[in-house]
């Protein structure tokens, strides 16, 4: 991974504009909008960690790593002004069975009333673009097989299936837009 450029310079310039479009949807780095920290932690916890008995504080601590001044991990928030719409993270590891793969687009979440309007796709695309702008040549993503199509339509390519107890699919996005070397 070549994620060694100054991250603030990436976010501050064209690869990370503050305003996504004129429709009211903005995508911001969580560090620029810390007021969304608690809701992001809550949503990630409820969606993926609460059921397994992890306390909310465990996720808050992990999410705090996204606030550190390192290029990766980072978290983005989709919002309409002060209204939280969704979130995505780019993190070093997301699948215990594949520790050699890094980094990952993970924790894609859109608030139920905001779904099916392209917010999720916009978040994933922005996270991908920021990763590329940081010097990452390949990003990974894991999902249930039933969601694989969704990401494939966005340009992701499945490289492995039925990984681990949850039978996850592993997908990649290369900066060039296609796989040009074995994973
Ligand atoms: C998965 C998730 C992030 C998608 O968010 P979203 O904002 O609804 O995503 P999009 O709007 O980009 O796309 C969702 C669907 O709406 C469709 N869609 C997008 N814009 C649309 C529009 N304007 N009109 C109608 N349909 C639209 C997309 O084609 C897609 O269709 P599909 O479900 O058949 O693939 C969201 O459902 C969620 O948070 N789920 C719970 C957490 C989760 O499962 N996260 C993913 C882990 S891998």
Image (cartoon, rainbow, N blue to C red):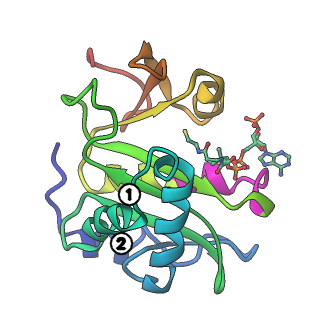
Residue 119 against residue 105 in the figure, above or below:
below
Magenta stretch prevailing secondary structure: helix
The residue at which mark 1 appears reads as: 130
Residue 97, image quadrant: top left
Task: Judge left or right: residue 130 versus residue 43.
Answer: left
Residue 96 against residue 145 in the figure, above or below:
below
Residue in the picture at 48% in, 18% down: 167
N-term-proximal mark, 1 vs 2: 2
Quarter of the picture holding the N terminus? top left
Task: Judge left or right: residue 32 versus residue 50.
Answer: left
- In the foreground, 161 or 20: 161
| Ligand 1 quadrant in view | top right
- In the foreground, 19 or 56: 56
Residue 107 within the segment the image draws in magenta: no
Residue in the picture at 33% in, 62% down: 58
Q: Mark 2 Cα within 10 Å, few/some/many (few <14, many 20+)?
A: some
Identify the magenta region.
Answer: 114-125
Q: Can you see residue 120? A: yes
């Amino acid at each position: 991974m070549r994620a060694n450029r100054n991250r603030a310079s990436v976010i501050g310039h064209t690869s990370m504009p503050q305003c996504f479009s004129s429709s009211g949807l903005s995508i911001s780095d969580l560090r620029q909008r810390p007021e969304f920290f608690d809701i992001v932690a809550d949503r990630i916890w409820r969606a993926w960690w609460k059921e397994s008995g992890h306390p909310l504080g465990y996720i808050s601590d992990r999410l705090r790593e996204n606030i550190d001044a390192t290029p990766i991990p980072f978290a983005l928030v989709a919002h309409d002004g002060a209204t939280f719409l969704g979130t995505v993270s780019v993190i070093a590891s997301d699948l215990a069975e594949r520790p050699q793969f890094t980094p990952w687009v993970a924790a894609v979440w859109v608030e139920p009333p905001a779904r099916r309007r392209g917010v999720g796709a916009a978040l994933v695309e922005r996270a991908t673009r920021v990763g590329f702008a940081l010097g990452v040549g390949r990003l990974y993503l894991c999902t249930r097989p039933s969601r694989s199509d969704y990401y494939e339509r966005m340009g992701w390519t499945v490289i492995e299936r039925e990984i681990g107890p949850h039978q996850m699919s592993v997908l990649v996005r290369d900066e060039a837009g296609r796989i040009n070397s074995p994973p």
